[in-house]
Amino acid sequence: AQSVTQLGSHVSVSEGALVLLRCNYSSSVPPYLFWYVQYPNQGLQLLLKYTSAATLVKGINGFEAEFKKSETSFHLTKPSAHMSDAAEYFCAVTNTGFQKLVFGTGTRLLVSP
Amino acid sequence: DAGVIQSPRHEVTEMGQEVTLRCKPISGHNSLFWYRQTMMRGLELLIYFNNNVPIDDSGMPEDRFSAKMPNASFSTLKIQPSEPRDSAVYFCASSLGGQANTEAFFGQGTRLTVV
């Protein structure tokens, strides 16, 4: 069965600092990987996805993630944090015939001035 | 497009009552998903419909839960009878095709509290 592990339930950064949110996956077959963002009292919004094309994936709002098979990782980064990035971020994996997303436990990003 | 629309946004009910959550997917999308989000278990897929047909309901917790999709623009998730442990945020999502690499669009969720 596939799964994802997100290290750190909370990550705090200062505005302008690098954002790094960690995600490691487990899958017996090549996975599809996703990062979603959830703002307070909102649904989830797709930031970016890896679907076996380029290993470096660029998403919305300046976020990107790199698929590293050797490390089974798909970490999310942003060079410079903005106050508006404060939210909860979910990594998800799927590799079945349909979109049965398996989510990680989420990482809450806190951005301080 | 208005996106995936869920109603109500908040629901407070007493234990033992029937609860019905509603979802209108994005027009043209043929796949619909119901997810539940709790602190203890995170986000879990409850059921998946494709072209109005339930494909996988292995995530439905027990017989108290049922879901229907009578047409392409409407789905319901019903809990009867409700219990306090059903308190959670329930999300509906839709996508075009439902293949593993396609984007799922989520509604804003229904926060259910069972007292």
Image (spheres, grey):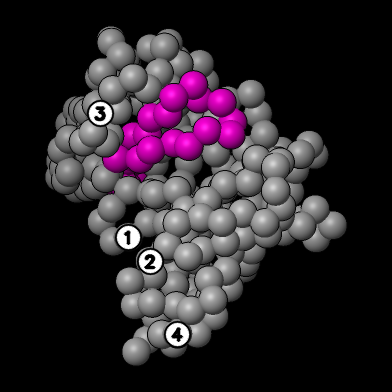
Chain to which the residue tagged by mark 3 belongs: B
Q: Quadrant of the C terminus of chain A?
A: bottom left
Q: The magenta stretch spans which residues?
A: B81-107
Question: For this rendering, which residue is in front, B16 or A64?
Answer: A64
Question: In the image, which disc is placed on residue A77?
Answer: none
- Few, some or many C-alpha atoms within 10 Å of disc 1 (few <14, some 14-19, many ≥20)? some
Q: Secondary structure at mark 4?
A: loop
**Residue A78, position in %: x, y?**
53, 71
Subunit under mark 2: A
Say if mark 2 contacts mark 4, CB within 8 Å. no
Q: Secondary structure at mark 1?
A: loop
User: B115 or B99, which lies in front?
Assistant: B99
* Image vertical order of residue B70 relative to residue A57, above or below: above
Q: What x and y, as percent, mark residue B22?
A: 22, 28
Q: CA distance from mark 3 to mark 2?
A: 24 Å
Nearest the eye: B7 or A75: A75
Q: Tell me the kind of residue under disc 1.
A: Tyr
Looking at the picture, which amino acid does disc 4 mark?
Gly
Left/right of residue A113 with respect to residue A23 in the rendered view: left
Label 2 sits on residue: A87
Question: Within the magenta stretch, is there residue B95?
Answer: yes
